[in-house]
Amino acid sequence: MLLCFPHGGGTASAYRQLADALFPRIELLAVQYPGRQDRLGEAMMPDIGAIAERVVRESTPHAGRPLAVFGHSMGATVAFEAARRFEQRGHALAALFVSGRTAPSVVQPTTLHLASDRALLDDMRRLGGPESNVVQVLVENPDLAEMVLPSVRNDYKAVETYRYKAGQDVSCPIVALRGDSDPSVTDTDIRLWSEFTSGSFETCEFSGGHFYLDEHADEVASLVGSRFDGTGRNMPRTDQE
């Protein structure tokens, strides 16, 4: 099973293409954060550690079935914190996939969660991909923006106030992914994830920007699958090429 965490402002449906690419070989379950879509009536959670704790507490991994965790952008940090908690509870992971996100030790320098709606929309536009289309729709529909932007602001707060707490990290392999023209994370940034596992580490780069995943669902599915059947590279920590 692959447990997936969406990007900031995103929903479980962000993983629809990857789920289709993995089916029926691997079951994909995507987390729906509170306060959006079918969980619109629930209170939002602006704390990454609290989100991870709740997901892990309410999850019951099946004995004998491999489990891997995947997160994109904000979801990568949530996935890391969830992976820590799964391992602390004795659940071995096949891998932790972190996508489009700097390592946990890098402090987010911005305070966009305190800024205007326009500033939030401008940053969503900067990241590009499907978010750019969303921005235009929100600009043209203020009533819709009033409904959607609170969850975006909540998630920006979660990212910008997150602080890594030193302690037991993970022992499973970490696979760090990024788009080669992502404006939010560099190759150097993504390689810092090697410091957060005692297991193997590798990076994988795809053409595209922050939301490269939508264009490369099949390739990412192949990479994920290799971690479940043992055909993936098992690179030592000293080799990060």
Image (spheres, grey):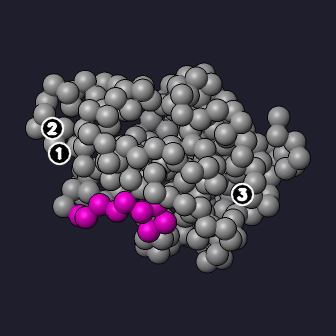
Amino acid at pointer 2: Leu
Q: Earlier in the sequence, mark 2 or mark 3?
A: 2
Residue 163: where, in percent of width, then height?
54, 60
- Label the magenta part by its dominant secondary structure: loop
**Within 10 Å of the Cα at label 2, are there few (<14), some (14-19), or many (20+) other Cα atoms?**
few
The residue positioned 37% from the left and 32% from the top of the image is 124
Amino acid at pointer 3: Phe
Residue 42: where, in percent of width, then height?
23, 64
Would you say the residues marked 3 and 1 are in contact, meaning their CB atoms lie under 8 Å apart? Answer: no
Quick one: 41 or 38, which is closer to the camera?
Answer: 41
Residue corresponding to mark 1: 147
Residue corresponding to mark 2: 144
Would you say the residues marked 1 and 2 are in contact, meaning their CB atoms lie under 8 Å apart? Answer: yes
Q: Earlier in the sequence, mark 3 or mark 1?
A: 1
Would you say the residues marked 2 and 3 are in contact, meaning their CB atoms lie under 8 Å apart? Answer: no
Image: 161 above or below 201 = below
Quarter placement of the C terminus: top right
Residue 11: where, in percent of width, then height?
35, 46
Amino acid at pointer 1: Met
Q: Describe the element under mark 2 as helix, strand or loop.
A: helix
The residue positioned 28% from the left and 28% from the top of the image is 135
Q: Describe the element under mark 3 as helix, strand or loop.
A: helix
* Residue range of the region highlighted in magenta in the rendering: 42-50
Image: 135 above or below 149 = above
Quick one: 220 or 199, which is closer to the camera?
Answer: 199
Residue 100: where, in percent of width, then height?
56, 38
Which image quadrant for residue 81?
bottom right
- Seen as rendered, the residue at the extreme left is 143
- Whether residue 195 appears in this view of the structure is yes
The residue positioned 37% from the left and 43% from the top of the image is 112
Q: Which mark is residue 233?
A: none
Residue corresponding to mark 3: 196
